[in-house]
Image: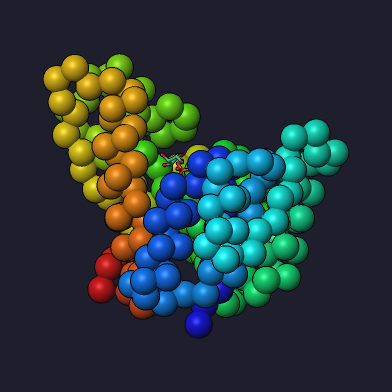
Amino acid sequence: MLNLGILISGQGSNMEAILKSIKSKKIHINPAIVISNKSDVRGIKIAQKLGIKTEIIQSKNFKGSRSDYDKKIISTLEKYGVTPKNGLVCLAGFMRIISPEFVKKYKNRIINIHPALLPAFPGLDAQKQAIKYGAKYSGCTVHFVDSGVDTGAIILQSIVKIRKGETEKTLSKLILKKEHETYSKAIKLFTENKIKISGRKTIII
Ligand code: GRF
């Protein structure tokens, strides 16, 4: 069975949804480790409550480069069996850009969720960007992580209609609900070896 490492920075609701899908046996993967770059976040408490091992690797005041920081993440992942051969790394609200070295080492084994329909509205505050732009629909995207920001091959997307009077807060809530379903579906596809990568496209078998 594959070993899963989840990287978080905050509330961890996507992480929680993934862990619950694993517990209820909808996804077959070993939830090996949850790593946060911040201490005292809700996500860590939830993971512990669910009986999952956790590690904090503080990024604030970290002395060293991005790649030095990521080396710590990589050695922690490996310690729990989340290796480039036998692991999957899910970024779930992990608010850091990862180094090219990390991406290269775990090629096509790191996935992320973004709260917009990429390539629209990449980067921070995607929900706010969609509202400001006047988009009629937004949603979420699960994609492989490459060396760009939110640019990797798309695995799955789900759509949300932007209603009259929608605010960043109400849209975020709607999208988050979709994120929870979509992320678990994408992980399930990965574990079943149903995602083939062809150039910058994925083909779902
Ligand atoms: C989600 O909207 C995710 O798409 C974005 O950050 C938010 C994290 O939420 N990258 P949570 O920590 O999973 O609750």
Please state if 155 lies on the left or on the right of 165 as rendered.
right
**What residue is at 20 percent from the left and 38 percent from the top?**
160
Q: Quadrant of the C terminus?
A: bottom left
In percent of width and height, residue 57 lies at 73, 49
**What residue is at 30 percent from the left and 55 percent from the top?**
181
In percent of width and height, residue 123 lies at 46, 32
Instruction: Single out the residue that lies furthest toward the front.
Output: 49
Instruction: Single out the residue that lies furthest toward the right.
Output: 63
Circle count: 0
In percent of width and height, residue 53 lies at 64, 64
In percent of width and height, residue 194 lies at 32, 74
Seen in the picture, residue 56 relative to 175 is either above or below; the reply is below
Q: In which quarter of the image is ligand 1?
A: top left
> Toward the viewer: 140 or 176?
176
Q: Do we see residue 97 in this rendering?
A: no
Seen in the picture, residue 130 relative to 181 is either above or below; the reply is above
Please state if 69 lies on the left or on the right of 199 as rendered.
right
Q: Do we see residue 156 in this rendering?
A: yes
**What residue is at 28 percent from the left and 27 percent from the top?**
170
> Toward the viewer: 199 or 73?
73
**What residue is at 55 percent from the left and 58 percent from the top?**
49
Q: Can you tell which quarter of the image residue 73 is in? A: bottom right
Q: How is the image coloured?
A: rainbow
Seen in the picture, residue 51 relative to 93 is either above or below; the reply is below
